[in-house]
Image (cartoon, coloured by chain):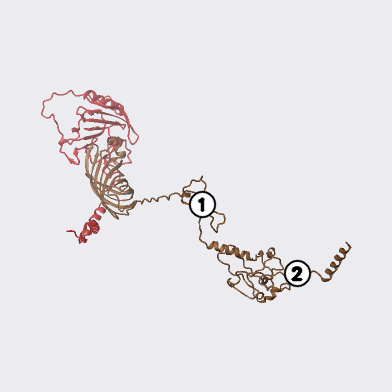
Amino acid sequence: MVGGAIVGLVGLLASVVAGPPILPELPRRGMRTPKTEASPKAEASPKTEAQPQPDAAPVSNAASDEPPDTQPATGSQKPAPEASPRPKPQRAESGSHAVSPARPAAAVRPPLQRVDTPRTGAMQGGLGPLVAATSADFTAWADDDQRAAAPLQRAKAPDSASLRSPGDRPPVAAKKPGYGDQVVIRRARPQPDPVPRFRRGPNAPERSATVVVGYRNFTILDALGRRQAWHMGSVEFTPFRRYFRLNFLTEAGVEGGEAARGGDRADFMVLQKLGVGLQYPHWVTPFIEGQGGVGVMRIEVFERNELALTWSVGVDVGAQWAVTQWLSLHAAVGWIHPVIRAEAVTVEFNRVAFKVGVGF
Amino acid sequence: MAPWPETGDGRTTAVKAGTGLKRAIARPIVSSVVARRIAVSVVLAAAFGALGCGVNGDDPNAWGMVQYVHADRTFALEYLSPPWEPLHVEPGLRLRITPEVFGFDIGIAASTHGLDIVQVAAEDQISKLQGVEVFVPEGERFDPLAGLEIPARREPAQPLALVDLADPFAVARAELTNLALEHDAKIDFDLSTVHNDAGQEGVTFQVVTGHDTFMRVVYLPSAPTVVRVAMVSVFDLATADIDQMLDGVITNMPVSESSEGSEG
């Protein structure tokens, strides 16, 4: 007991006299590894120490793998397997300031971040500590490279497996290197590829309708000043019907409106017209057409029949909608200028006419 | 022989045939340049000639509507001429329509329609207006009984002798009774009231006379006596045209509106 106390006091005095033990500096990246007295192998290989070791970037957590006092003595450790084949640093400044070389492209681990440290060796910025690669890491990286370079191989199930129902027990597949215990087995029955069905739409019509049965309506004033609506039915034949439009129209109509009240629809007219115009044949064929024609007209006033000569000019602007290949709808609005030559008077009008029809 | 060289290739021949058809269709109708210009000029001249060659149809008088105001300004009306044409204007206005078929005179000395407007007098006899033959000029009047010995018929009493001539209804009832009882007229529609365009209320009836003609009479109030509008026709007079014409008859025209005895 007393002896122990004496030894403790002696130790305490010795420590007070000698001071605290001086620990060696931790190696820093890019710094020359300090010589240590306790590493005779390091002295035996001064050439290795003199060279900058970019890959042996010192990190703080390297102590978890090896003792801190042995870490700086890189020369004493087993040489890194990639030390010689590694590419040179892309940028090498002063001897103590080096950058990490480019890593292999197929490396699995994320590349180490490059950290440029000042000559003082102090860590700058908020970067975390870097991890020093060990020989085990290099071995693991080499394995990863081999796996990555190997072509992707799937576990090939027997043909009968594809026809197996989901409830059946799958056969044991042989393990393939590179996937560990993972086995890829196709269980679902492959569905047959849907047969592509393409129905090509019909081509847009290159011509307008050949024959149009139409209805035109316009209103004039009769001899007694009453509104006289004309309901005109027409049959049109269009021999030229691409961009240039030639149209033969035969129109016949009866009166209506106020003048025909009481069911007395006695007035009628028949016209033969010629139309010339332009159009753009497509699904919807717009057209503009000038029309002119002559005809005869029966006018009845006070129960007396009178035969009048009539002629008209006008312009129709409209379109034909090709519903099907052989059926189209026709609509137009236009200006019409009918002139009626009666027994003693010639009367003319300027009216807006509406027209609809069905084309074939 | 085909207009294209025979290649022996059916497809080529078909294509060429189609091309030839297209060329034939696309060939201008008038190949000559001069003739084409003439054709275009004719078409354009006809098109523009159709413009402005007549009277604007929106004008109320475009078709020949005539506004007539009697000389004493007792009545006025509008009539369409043609087909109406005046026979005389005194003492009242008398119009007629000559028979035509599709604008051609058929040469019959008669009328299809007759109209007589006059202020009634005590000695008037409406029976004298029966028959469309009344509504012809004096020289053209046809008398089917001329030359025949016919016993003299008892002259009927004057139907308006004891009637208030300023009362349209009284005058209408007296003359309808005379026609029905004395001249065997059949009543088509009985006495009824009408209103003209000016809002005046009148009395009207229609009968079928012994001459197989329709007679429609309208009585409108006027001063000093009633204005009677009698229409006679071989056709039914209950039509829209007749209604519109009768509605346009106005009595007691103000002096400042139009000149006397004029046709505007």
Alpha carbon distance from label 1 to label 2: 59 Å
Q: Chain of mark 2?
A: A
Instruction: Give the percent coordinates (x, y) of residue B113.
Output: 22, 35
Instruction: Give the percent coordinates (x, y) of residue A256.
Output: 30, 40
Q: Are marks 1 and 2 in contact (CB under 8 Å)?
A: no
Is residue A43 placed above or below B154 in the rendered structure?
Answer: below
Q: Quadrant of residue A18?
A: bottom right
Mark closer to the chain start, 1 or 2: 2
Q: Please state which of residues A62 and B30 is positioned toward the viewer in this rendering.
A: A62
Instruction: Give the percent coordinates (x, y) of residue B76.
Output: 29, 37
Q: Please state which of residues A60 and A46 is positioned toward the viewer in this rendering.
A: A46
- Which residue lies under the disc numbered 2? A23
Is residue A221 placed above or below B36 in the rendered structure?
Answer: above
Which residue occupies 52% across, 47% down?
Answer: A169
- Which residue lies under the disc numbered 1? A185
Mark seen at residue B76: none
Q: Is circle 1 on the same chain as circle 2?
A: yes
- The kind of residue on which mark 1 rests is Ile
Q: Residue furthest right?
A: A2
- The kind of residue on which mark 2 rests is Leu
Instruction: Give the percent coordinates (x, y) of residue B178.
Output: 24, 25
Q: Quadrant of the C terminus of chain B?
A: top left
Q: Secondary structure at mark 1?
A: loop
Label 2 packing within 10 angstroms: few (<14), some (14-19), many (20+): few
Is residue A235 placed above or below B31 in the rendered structure?
Answer: above
What hue does chain A carry in this figure?
brown
* Chain drawn red in the picture: B
Q: Quadrant of the N terminus of chain B?
A: bottom left
Q: Chain of mark 1?
A: A
Q: Secondary structure at mark 2?
A: loop
Q: Please state which of residues A201 and A209 is positioned toward the viewer in this rendering.
A: A201
